């Protein structure tokens, strides 16, 4: 079982024993769950959508790396090659699960480490009145050009027909914030871009985040 919330919502195999169905959980085929439980880690994004969306490859520095100076960009991208996914059990010296939330409504970039907001800062948005829609980008590897990163982009619902490359290129953060975030970046980092503001109704407490889009 992979827990999603402190109230008992989880990913689990098969039916809940003794009940006809789960109460908000995601029931998985046995074979798929056996594989899933061997590759997931703390901080793994879980996206539950009502329409099918295949992950699409994107090569782009992203809203953080693109705000760095050229030499800083090369150094950060090179450093990504030395980092790994966050381990399930960790101490302060180990890699932490980091997520970024870009809110068009708030005009801010939020940085979450192990689910806790550790910093935030203003962003500049190209065509600020044009919707983002809801997108999730997962950082995969540094690109061989030394200036970009390879991402998986997943569109959630509707709201924008723009390409993922165009969308991620519309945002830049303050250079000082970019330097701070660059030190936290790692393969598996999750970037969420949304039109919605950050609010108690779209996140929970402690070390996990639930974002609902309607």
Image (spheres, rainbow, N blue to C red):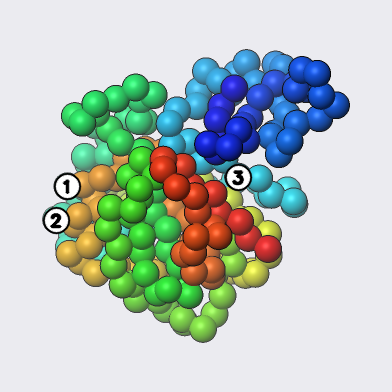
Q: Residues within 10 Å of mark 3 (few under 14, many from 20)?
A: few
Residues tagged 2 and 1 counted as in contact (Cβ below 8 A): yes
Quadrant of the snapshot with the C terminus = bottom right
The residue positioned 78% from the left and 22% from the top of the image is 15
Residue 76 is left or right of residue 135, and the answer is left
Relative to 67, is 97 above or below? Answer: above
* CA neighbours of label 2 inside 10 A, class few (<14), some (14 to 19), many (20+): few
The numbered dot on residue 71 is 2
Residue 98 x, y percent position in the rendering = 35, 44
The residue located at (36%, 64%) in the rendering is 109
Quarter-wise, where is residue 213 in the image? bottom right
- The mark lying in front, picked from 3 and 1, is 3
x%, y% of residue 87?
35, 25
Inspect this view and state whether residue 153 appears: no
Q: Residue 65 appears at what percent x and percent y?
A: 28, 57
The residue identified by callout 3 is: 47
Foreground pick, 168 / 24: 24
Which residue position holds label 1?
75
Name the image quarter holding residue 72: bottom left
Spatial CA span between label 2 and label 1: 6 Å
């Amino acid at each position: 079982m992979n827990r999603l919330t402190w109230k008992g919502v989880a990913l689990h195999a098969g039916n809940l024993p003794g009940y006809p169905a789960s109460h908000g959980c995601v029931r998985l085929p046995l074979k798929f769950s056996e594989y899933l439980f061997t590759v997931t880690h703390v901080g793994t994004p879980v996206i539950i959508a009502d329409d099918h969306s295949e992950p699409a490859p994107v090569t782009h520095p992203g809203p953080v790396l693109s705000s760095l100076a050229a030499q800083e960009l090369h150094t950060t991208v090179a450093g990504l090659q030395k980092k790994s996914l966050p381990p399930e059990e960790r101490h302060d010296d180990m890699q932490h699960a980091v997520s970024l939330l870009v809110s068009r409504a708030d005009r801010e970039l939020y940085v979450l480490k192990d689910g806790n907001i550790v910093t935030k800062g203003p962003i500049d948005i190209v065509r600020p009145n044009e919707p983002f829609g809801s997108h999730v980008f997962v950082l995969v590897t540094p690109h061989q050009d030394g200036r970009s990163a390879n991402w998986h982009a997943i569109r959630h619902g509707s709201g924008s027909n723009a390409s993922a490359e165009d969308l991620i290129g519309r945002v830049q953060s303050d250079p000082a914030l970019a330097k701070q975030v660059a030190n936290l970046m790692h393969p598996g980092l999750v970037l969420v871009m949304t039109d919605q503001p950050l609010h108690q109704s779209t996140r929970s407490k402690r070390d996990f985040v639930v974002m609902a889009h309607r």
